[in-house]
Image (cartoon, rainbow, N blue to C red):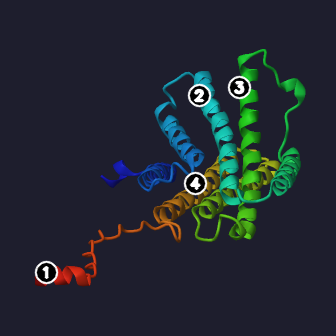
Amino acid sequence: MLSNFAFSARQVLWTLTFAAQLVLLVVLLGRDRIRRYPWFTASIVLFSLRLLAEVLLAGRMPMLTLQEVFLSLADLAAIVSLLVVAEIAWQAFAPAPRLAWVIGVLVALVVAGGVLAAWGPWPALKELSWNSKIGVLRLMQLAAQKGDTLVDLLTVELGLLVVLFGRRFKAGWQSHTQKIAIGLSTVAMAWMGIQGVWQLIAHNAHPTTQDEYARLMSLGGKLINANQVVYLAAAVWWIAWLWRDEPGTEAVSASPTEVALPAEEAPVSEESTDRLEK
């Protein structure tokens, strides 16, 4: 009987991750964090939508149509993630001088762009084309992959800056902005590390039998599960910290209604006293 209810590790992680996303959205809505972090909230909604699409659409649509849906969501997620980076940077360093902003953005883009150029294989220009549906899908896939990598690099840079210098501005240790930045940068570092490990394994591995290929694919699945565990831990981290109020922003209880004190009696003049005696 128990074998009929066996779940794979991937299914368990999917369920826990989706549940954590829903709880996080409830926290963002119930604790009124959406007004301050609208793009972060949008990224959580989009990630939940991608999780649902993965289960509801897989195997129920033609392969090309399914790839169009998934790649469109992936490209949109890369754009929203870039806006999340900008949102967290603004929340953390809004009081910084304009010159510091310009220099910081340029340095971050140059460093991230340089790493991106050297990161992973790039397809030849002749392989990129808008003339066919397959070519468009390849371009969409390339934009999603490189866009995610660029966002991950910028996120790691932003996380380090927030941890090192956030206290001087608006992102102290117990601020929501720093907690979000730490979670995002942790997820980004974990995913880049897993990608690097997989590229190293794939470059050196040369399976010659079906069993060796199956073991290689199993290892890849375990790496993906490990990344899912890191994201799940980050979601729990966000739930715990966003539920709390930042120091100094706790709701102040309404002050009791002031009771009007009786006005002091006016001094009675001598004339009025005389009239009363008469």
Q: Quadrant of residue 76?
A: top right
Given residues 180 and 228, the one toward you in this image is 180
Tag 4: Cα neighbours inside 10 Å, few (<14), some, or many (≥20)? many
Gap between marks 2 and 3 measured at Cα? 10 Å
Secondary structure under the numbered disc 2 in the rendered image = helix
Q: Nearer the viewer, residue 46 or 229?
A: 46
Residue 61 located left or right of residue 187: left
The residue beneath circle 4 is 228
* Label drawn at residue 69: 2
> Identity of the amino acid at label 2?
Val
Residue at x 65% of width, y 59% of height: 181
Disc 3, disc 4: CB below 8 Å? no
* Residue at the farthest left position: 278
- Image x and y of residue 217, in percent: 65, 47
- Secondary element at image label 3: helix
Mark 3, other Cα within 10 Å: few <14 / some 14–19 / many ≥20: some
Q: Amino acid at mark 3?
A: Leu
The image shows residue 238 at horizontal and vertical percentages of 53, 60
Type of the residue with mark 1: Leu
Using the image, determine if residue 129 lies above or below residue 1. above
C-alpha separation, residue under disc 1 versus residue under disc 4: 92 Å
What residue is shown at x 56% (from left), y 46% (from top)?
Answer: 38
At horizontal 27% and vertical 75% (from top left) the residue drawn is: 263
Q: Earlier in the sequence, mark 3 or mark 1?
A: 3
Q: CA distance from mark 3 to mark 1?
A: 103 Å
N-terminal-most mark, 1 or 4? 4
Q: Which residue is mark 1?
A: 276
- Check the picture and name the quadrant holding the C terminus: bottom left
